[in-house]
Amino acid sequence: MKRLTLALILLFGFAARALAADATLVIGVTPFPHAELAKIARDVLAKDGYTLEIREFNDYVQPNLALASGALYANFFQHVPYLDNMNKEKKLDLAWVAKIHIEPLGLYSRKITALDALKKGDRLAVPNDPTNEARALRLLEKHALIALKPGELVTVRDITANPRGLEFVELEAAQLPRTLNDVSAAVINTNFAAEAGLIPSRDAIIIEEKDSPYANVLVVRKADADSPATAALVKAFRSAAVKAYIEKELIPRGIVPAF
């Protein structure tokens, strides 16, 4: 009887520890605005019995690798085209489960205030990851600075017309704000622009329209896409509290809700 009691105590002890482990979800985010939104979602998620542990990254590659390896339960930093390319390129098995917000890509400068001020030979910096580079170049094409070949993942090598003779510098997205003293202008993701004190609605010379398909999404491993924990995570990130924060704090900075 004593052995049975001891066995039951051990069994319930292991079960309690497993439950506690399952109730903690680790999410990888980039700093702005993803970390802020995750903190709001964390408070909402706590009401459903989950603890959200937030880990910050400063690049666009490691959060997906960490998620695929199991070091994270979810991540929140990327848009769907970027995820699709990463899944293909790195042979990952990740899935997006909710669209949260849209961060318009913009052209910023410390040297000019209008496109007409660009001169022959001026240097423009663009992101060097496939989806954001294509996105940046399409923005420039829309404003008649260049023309490009058809296709999704175009690069500077796909420029077919460059009437102003602009030179292009391809750099990691996080580094782009630091180039503004060295180039005429740079196409920068909103999160990195904001970290550098730039406000899209005030500082961008040109910017993507609000109907951009590049919504930032919540991502998990495909095996976890339909789990109760993921459902709770989606509920928290698409809560009224998160939407209210986006509408009050982020819309003035050019970031809009996607739900």
Image: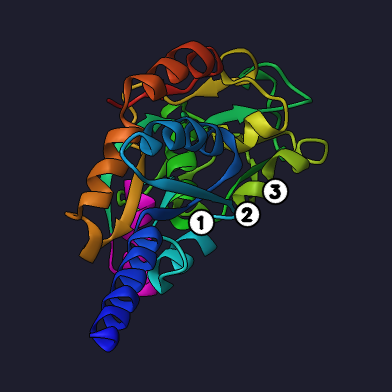
Looking at the rendered structure, the kind of residue marked 3 is Gln
Q: Nearer the viewer, residue 7 or 208?
A: 7
The image quadrant where one finds the N terminus is bottom left
Looking at the rendered structure, the kind of residue marked 2 is Glu
Residue bearing the label numbered 1: 129
Residue placed at 53% from the left, 64% from the top?
A: 62
Indicate the secondary structure of the residue bearing disc 3. helix
Marks 1 & 2, CB-CB < 8 Å contact: yes
Q: In the image as oriented, which residue stretches furthest toward the left? A: 226
- The location of residue 78, given as percent across then percent down, is 43, 47
Q: Is residue 42 magenta?
A: no
Residue placed at 34% from the left, 29% from the top?
A: 212
Q: Nearer the viewer, residue 159 or 226?
A: 226
Looking at the rendered structure, the kind of residue marked 1 is Asp
- The location of residue 90, given as percent across then percent down, is 39, 73
Q: Nearer the viewer, residue 83 or 248?
A: 248
Alpha-carbon distance for marks 3 and 2? 6 Å
Q: Quadrant of residue 238?
A: top left
Residue bearing the label numbered 3: 175
Residue bearing the label numbered 2: 172
Please determine whether, in this image, residue 213 is positioned above or below residue 156. above
Q: Which residues are magenta?
A: 80-94
Q: Is residue 85 magenta?
A: yes
Residue placed at 27% from the left, 35% from the top?
A: 235
Marks 3 & 2, CB-CB < 8 Å contact: yes
